Amino acid sequence: YYNALSWDVVWAKASLTPESAHTWQVPIRPYGVNMTLANAVKAYKPKRLVITLGANAVAVMTEDYFISTYEELVKKVKENSPETQVIVQSIFPVDIRWDTYANTNNSINNTKINRLNYKLAEMCERQEVKFLNTAEVLKDSSGRLENNLGYTSDGIHLLPSGNSKVVEYIRTHAYIEGE
């Protein structure tokens, strides 16, 4: 998040998907170890975990498989650390050029992202975890990634300005216990 958050609170690995999150070793920097997310939650019992997966997986996973592997991850996290507040963040929108692929299965586009975000919200309800719709702060009036928030080289990944909007949204939409 371009220094908007400290590495002490971010567990991240490039190209992590709901599927690979079950087996890939992720750097848990404050502790100097690499482990799966479920094992890290079990070992370190964070107070809160915001899970952000999606952009890369949207193109290569069917929607049903995406949701089923994501839900399995959420279940494992909850089992490994029942006191951790789990929050699932929405998948970010993409710029206009990706919507030309709206009718193909192996693509990233806003139509597919919107469907998956809806299914993620449903999954969160089933799992009794919070859904954080950060996508809304990134969209222009047509529902696509707002200009100047994403890299023009790919139209998918956020610039520092986009990440700053996401972090601000997270901070202003705080998880309050009991809600």
Image (cartoon, rainbow, N blue to C red):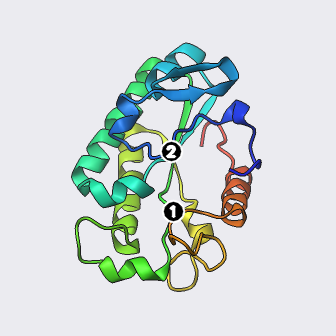
Q: Which residue is mark 1?
A: 92
Of badges 1 and 2, nearer the viewer stands 2
- Above or below, 50 against 159 in this view is above
Within-10-Å neighbours for mark 1: few <14, some 14–19, many 20+: many
Give the residue drawn at x 68%, y 53%: 173
Alpha carbons under labels 1 and 2: distance apart? 15 Å
Amino acid identity at mark 2: Ala
Residue extending furthest front?
A: 153
- Above or below, 157 against 97 in this view is above
Left or right: 122 with respect to 49?
left
Element assignment for label 2: loop
- Above or below, 151 against 124 in this view is below
Q: Quadrant of residue 163?
A: bottom right
Whole-percent x, y for residue 77 in the image = 44, 27
Left or right: 48 with respect to 91?
right
Give the residue drawn at x 76%, y 49%: 4
Q: Which residue is mark 2?
A: 14
